[in-house]
Structures are given as C-alpha cells and as structure tokens.
Image (tube, rainbow, N blue to C red):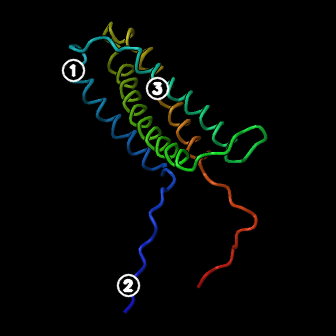
Amino acid sequence: MSQPSTPEPRLQPTNPATLVVAGLGSAAIAWLVISEWYGSMPPLPWLPAFTLLALALVEFALAQQTRARIDRKPGRPGVEPLAVARYAVLAKASSLAGAIFAGFSAGLTLWLLVDGQRLSAAARDLPPAVISLSCSLALIAAGLWLERACRVPERPDDDKRDID
C-alpha cells in the first residue's frame, strides 16, 4: 500500500468571506462595547486612523514596486523571492487587520449615528470614527493589492499538460 503524498504547503489567496466574517464580528463587538461603556470612555483619538492610512500608503507603494520588479520592468532590480514571500504574509495580515478595524469602526459609526444622536459627545466622536473606517478600507485594499502584486506570473514555456 502506498502512502498518500502530502501536499506541499502553499500560501492561499485571501478569502473574501474571511474578511467579511472578521468585519461583521468586530462590528458586533464594537456595538456591544460602545453601547455599554460610551459615557465613561475618553474621546476617540485620531492616531489610529492616521496609522492605518500610513500603512495603506506604504503597502500601495510596496505593491507597485514589487509588481514592477517581478515583471522585470526596465531599470528595476530583480526581486528577492524571500522578500516577496514576506510581503505576501504582510499583505494577508494587513487585509485581515483592516477588516477587523473596518468592522469595529463601522459598528462604532453606526452606533453613533443611530443611538448616539442624543449625546453631545457623539458629534465629537463621529469624524474620527468615519475617517478610521475609510482608512481601514484603504488598508484592506492595499493588502489585497500587495497580495496580488506578489503573485508570480505564469511563464509561457510552462507545460500545461494534465497529469492523470
């Protein structure tokens, strides 16, 4: 009896369903937390939003640079395979973190719009919540773009024969 061959470990593309579930879960948690403790919380800070935006910008630039290096565009140095693997892991982690932050920011924003209308602090906290949501969505997009940029293109001389 032959032993079944074990598949080679591979990094799979990010599943959109994973991002949606993470976002919905963190939105639910945000709604519960904010509805319970909003009166005793300090004002929402701007720093997380700007941090997410900075990460998104860095990853967008990294994606452009990596794609050009993988495609061997003129004037670009070759790419280090281990660096591309690290970028792919960074991309997957960033898109998941962006989904969690986006869900939390969306839950917070919705609560401020729906239940927070009666509180004066809601008007103060709404702009940072909306900007955090936007920056989180930018991080998701940047992570997915970087992940796509890390894909190795198929070479035309590769065999495409089916193995039975």
Percent position of residue 109, x then y: 40, 23
Query: Label 1 to label 3, Cα distance in Å?
Result: 24 Å
- Is residue 156 or residue 136 the one in the foreground? 156
Tell me whether circle 2 and circle 1 mark residues in contact (CB < 8 Å): no
Which mark identifies residue 37? 1
Q: Please tell me which of labels 2 and 1 falls first in the chain.
A: 2
47 versus 31 height, above or below:
above
Location of residue 62 by image quarter: top right
Percent position of residue 65, x then y: 65, 36
Location of residue 113 by image quarter: top left
Q: Amino acid at mark 2?
A: Gln
The secondary structure type at the circle numbered 1 is: helix
Q: Amino acid at mark 3?
A: Leu
Dot 2 corresponds to which residue? 3
Q: Left or right: where does residue 52 sit relative to residue 145?
A: left
Tell me whether circle 1 and circle 3 mark residues in contact (CB < 8 Å): no
Q: Residue at x 59, y 33 (%)?
A: 60
Q: Left or right: where does residue 48 sit relative to residue 58?
A: left
144 versus 6 height, above or below:
above
Rendered-image quadrant of the N terminus: bottom left
Q: Amino acid at mark 1?
A: Trp
Q: Residue at x 41, y 36 (%)?
A: 97
Give the class, few, some or many, for how many residues have Cα within 10 Å of label 1's Cα (few <14, many ≥20): few
Dot 3 corresponds to which residue? 52
User: Residue lying furthest bottom in this view?
Assistant: 1
Percent position of residue 68, x then y: 70, 41
Percent position of residue 91, x then y: 50, 41
Q: Please tell me which of labels 1 and 3 falls first in the chain.
A: 1
Location of residue 157 by image quarter: bottom right
